[in-house]
Amino acid sequence: MTDVAENVVDMTNRVLGVLLRNGGVDVRSVDGEEAAVFSVEAEQSVTTGVKILEEAVYATPSLLGDYGKTIIIIDSPRFTLVPSRLASDDEMLESVVGHMWPGVSLDEVLVNDGYGDACLISVPDAAVTGFAGRTFQRPQIVNRLSALCQFFATQSKPVNNMRLYAHFSNRSCLDIIVMTGDGLLMANSFECGDFNDAVYFIMAAVKDCGFDQLDDELLLSGDVTACDEVTDMLRKYVNSVMPLMLPPKAKDCPLELQITEI
């Protein structure tokens, strides 16, 4: 008789990461030591986040396979950083949420893991989270910026100085994340009309964070053309400007999806 245990598939090493973006989704499926990365593009007429996610699921049934963990990464313009101790206190958090987003209940707020003394909270699209909750097995919903914070936090250990990460998810979208030895100091996203705008936002972060332009590190990642264009401009003001050296397995995969390795 065949031992039933031999037919039981170990789900603990199977992880699915889905990054929802404008125009489609990027997917990373990890099964033990094996990983597959692919994209599912939506029809041009499909513009809302929930419809894009629905179309991706219908077009790719494998997304509904058996996984030990499913991570759905979504964007939201409604986010802020708060002290980690505040995020763990419902009464204080409710006060902040009520002030920033009147009418939003705590049940609608996404609180991702803290990074040292700071925690990112956000209000995602309820239609997207509702569909994800009905469709995937116990999905973990993560804010896209929080996913980047988690990735860059792993790149900053150990760190004795300040590191400013400027990530171009495309040529017009810039994410700035600043890490210190104590954890996350700043996280924000900007729409950039041109590369001069990107340099302006980066240098504004340099000023606001007390970045030492001689000794601290400014690391660029993402869209190669955007990184190349701003490098020489930034080196006029900052001594250490360099590309982020990524592990080989990360080069063909959106950084946001690298949290499936953590």
Image: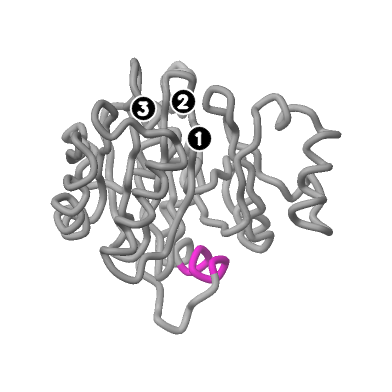
Q: Does 51 lie within the magenta span? A: yes
**Earlier residue among tags 1 and 2:** 2
Q: Are marks 3 and 2 in contact (CB under 8 Å)?
A: no
What is the residue that sits farthest to the bottom in this orientation? 45
**Rendered view: 88 above or below 135:** above
Separation (CA) of disc 3 from disc 2: 36 Å
How busy is the neighbourhood of tag 2: few (under 14 within 10 Å), some, or many (20 plus)?
A: few
Of residue 55 and residue 148, the one placed in the foreground of this image is 148
Image x and y of residue 8, in percent: 46, 25
Residue type marked 1: Lys
Residue type for callout 2 = Thr
Q: Position of residue 220 (x, y in %)?
A: 25, 44
- SS category of the residue bearing label 3: loop
**Which quadrant holds residue 169?**
bottom left
Residue 12 disc label: 2
Residue mark closest to the camera, 3 vs 1: 3
Query: Residue 255 versus residue 36: which sits nearer the camera?
Result: 255
Numbered label tally: 3
Looking at the image, which residue is at 40% across and 81% down?
44
Q: Which mark is residue 69?
A: 1
In the displayed structure image, the side of residue 146 where residue 137 appears, left or right = right
Q: Which residue is mark 3?
A: 162
Q: What x and y, as percent, mark residue 30?
A: 34, 36
Q: Earlier in the sequence, mark 3 or mark 1?
A: 1
Disc 2 element: loop
What's the magenta region?
A: 49-55
* Residue 1 in view: no
